[in-house]
Amino acid sequence: MRYWLMKSEPSDVSIDDLAKRANKTIAWYGVRNYQARNFMRDQMRIGDQVFFYHSSCKHPGIVGIAEVCKLAYPDTTQFDSNNKYFDPKATSEIPRWFNVDVRFVSKTRLIDIKELRSYPDLLGMRILQKGNRLSITPVDPAEWKCIIGIM
DNA sequence: GCCAACGTTGGC
DNA sequence: GCCAACGTTGGC
C-alpha cells in the first residue's frame, strides 16, 4: 500500500464537499499533468491512503484523509466540450487523462504548510520544495507516520 | 495581485 | 530535437 498527497482547491472540491457526497466518494477529475496522471494510472491501488490538501486558498495545508477506492479509468471530463477540462485531442478510443476515485476517511485539524516546514523529518517532502506544482505526489511511509503522529 | 518556477507548445 | 514564448500553478 502506498501513501499520497493530493491537492484540491477547496473552491472546487473541499474536504467537506467530499464528506457530503454520496458514498463519500468522488472521481479525481481534472488532472492535466502527465506525471500526476501516471501516478494515478500506474501506481495507485485500492486502499492507498491519501492526505487531502487544500491549495490555492487562504489556509493551504492538509485537512483530511481519504483513500483510493477505484482504480484509474478515463476521466470523463476530457470528452465533454462544455467542460473546462475538455481536451480536443482525447478520444474514447485513445483517452489521454485518467482518474481514480477516492473516498473520504476523516477530517483532521489543519496542518498548514508552515507547520509542515517546521518538522525536519518532513523537509524532503515534494510539496515543500520550491516551485513544486505537482498536484499529486507520493508520500513516503516515514513522512506519513510523522504527520499522523502530529495530528 | 505578484511573480518564481515549471510544463507545454510550436516554429525552426 | 532545440529552445523561446507562453500559460498555469500556488504560496505569499
Image (cartoon, coloured by chain):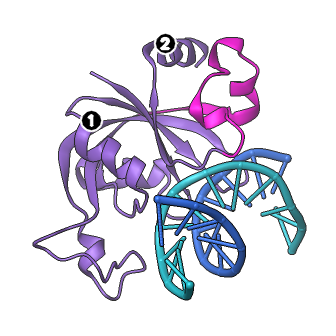
Chain colours: A purple, B cyan, C blue
A124 vs A107: above or below:
above
**Label 2 in the same subunit as label 1:** yes
Q: Earlier in the sequence, mark 2 or mark 1?
A: 1
Q: Mark 1 points at which residue?
A: A43
Q: Which chain carries label 1?
A: A
Q: What quarter of the picture does the C terminus of chain A occupy?
A: top right
The secondary element bearing badge 1 is classed as helix
Most distant residue in the left direction: A93
Q: What quarter of the picture does the N terminus of chain A occupy?
A: top left
Q: Residues within 10 Å of mark 2 (few under 14, many from 20)?
A: few
User: Nearer the viewer's eye, disc 2 or disc 1?
Assistant: 1
* Contact between labelled residues 1 and 2, with CB atoms less than 8 Å apart: no
Left or right of A46: which side holds A60? right
**Which corner quadrant of the image does residue A119 belong to?**
top right
Numbered badge on residue A145? 2
**Which corner quadrant of the image does residue A70 belong to?**
top left
Left or right of A54: which side holds A75? left
- x%, y% of residue A11? 56, 63
- x%, y% of residue A143? 53, 17
Q: Does the magenta stretch include residue A130?
A: yes
Which kind of residue does numbered mark 2 sit on? Answer: Lys
- x%, y% of residue A35? 41, 48
A118 vs A72: above or below:
above
Name the residue located 29 percent from the left edge and 29 percent from the top edge. A48
Asked whether A151 or C5 is in front, the reply is: C5
Q: Is residue A17 magenta?
A: no
Name the residue located 30 percent from the left edge and 54 percent from the top edge. A26
Residues rendered magenta in the picture: A106-131
**Which corner quadrant of the image does residue A109 belong to?**
top right
Name the residue located 19 percent from the left edge and 33 percent from the top edge. A46
